[in-house]
Amino acid sequence: MINFLFLLPFLCTLVFFIVIMTAEPRSLWSGASFIALLFGTALSAFLILARYSVWLAQNAPWLIAILVVLLVATVIVLMMFPAMLAVIFFVEGIRLIRREGFSLTNCLSIAFSIFIVLTMTLFPWIVATLNNPLINFLYLIATIIVGYFSFLLGLYVISALINLMHIRKARNFDQIVVLGSGLAGDKVTPLLASRIDAGLVLAKKNPNAVLILSGGQGPGETVPEGFAMKQYALQHGANPARTISEENSKNTLENLQFSYALFPVSNGKTAIVTTRYHVFRALLLGKSLGIRCSGYGAKTKWYFTLNALLREFAAYLSETKAKQFKILFILLMPFLTAAIINLILN
């Protein structure tokens, strides 16, 4: 019989994950609790295997062999992960530019890939070659900052993925908000059409919900996005009596603010529909406005998603910059204090 103590790490982290997901999944704590659950599961598995290793070696040597292979494979993948990540972002960045055209925002994937390579190779070599105390200290500070933002990016991605998963059926919504993403003149683009189509699927499952198409008129657009989105929705089967447009917003926050004023049930259940990479940040903004909402994502191309996800993370950092500066200050304070004391004493 397995000792209950061996299962304790798994059970504690499982409870933590369930509490976070039940109370409020729209935060980075959802990603943090999932990572904790993975570590708790791994620790419990290690304790159980260590306790029964002799028995397994005698009665199930094949299982030991499989576990050793999996362990070695995991270590190799973890060691190669930064290089693999750099290759993936570089290749997909080239595909994005070839298919969508050159622009600074479309270069984010390639820039991120180059930064990973420089962080792994050139920067450490320069620091080791110069061997200067001041440069070593600055490199330490830079390493902490990069490490923090890398960890934060990982949490953001995991949290975003978790918030795309729904155990309960998409029913009983009072309103469904589809966020705009730009027009080509007065025409709905394929990206925007995928969002509206996803909203129409939800509307069919929730016939009593109001479908709100949200978006104002931006540069190069001859009509407000909301207007064009509503026309598209009506042409593709939306109920005219339960379809309205919001035509004044300029960004995601205003999409939600101005749509909220149109809600038939202000404290009701709301579905926010946008492209998958954009769902999590929309949910965070919805949470900040006090909207009870779940997010549903429309599909888009993989190469476009990677680049857009970096943009979304950058936007998240911009929206939470005061909080990020405080956390970085706390992380760096011991090292800065030590450096100041060392200067005073010397």
Image (tube, rainbow, N blue to C red):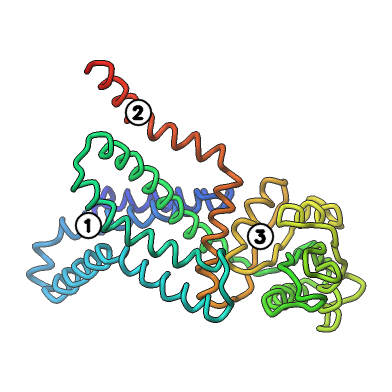
Nearer to us of marks 3 and 1 is: 3
Q: Earlier in the sequence, mark 1 or mark 2?
A: 1
Residue placed at 65% from the left, 57% from the top? 282
Q: Earlier in the sequence, mark 3 or mark 1?
A: 1
Q: Is residue 225 above or below residue 338?
A: below
Residue placed at 28% from the left, 39% from the top? 135
Nearer to us of marks 2 and 3 is: 2
Q: Which residue is mark 3?
A: 294
Label 1 and label 2: CA atoms lie apart by: 38 Å
Residue 164 position by quadrant:
bottom right
Label 3 and label 1: CA atoms lie apart by: 36 Å
Q: Which residue is mark 1?
A: 46
Residue 192 on image: x %, y %: 71, 74
Residue 8 on image: x %, y %: 32, 49
What kind of residue is marked 2? Leu
Farthest-out residue, top: 345
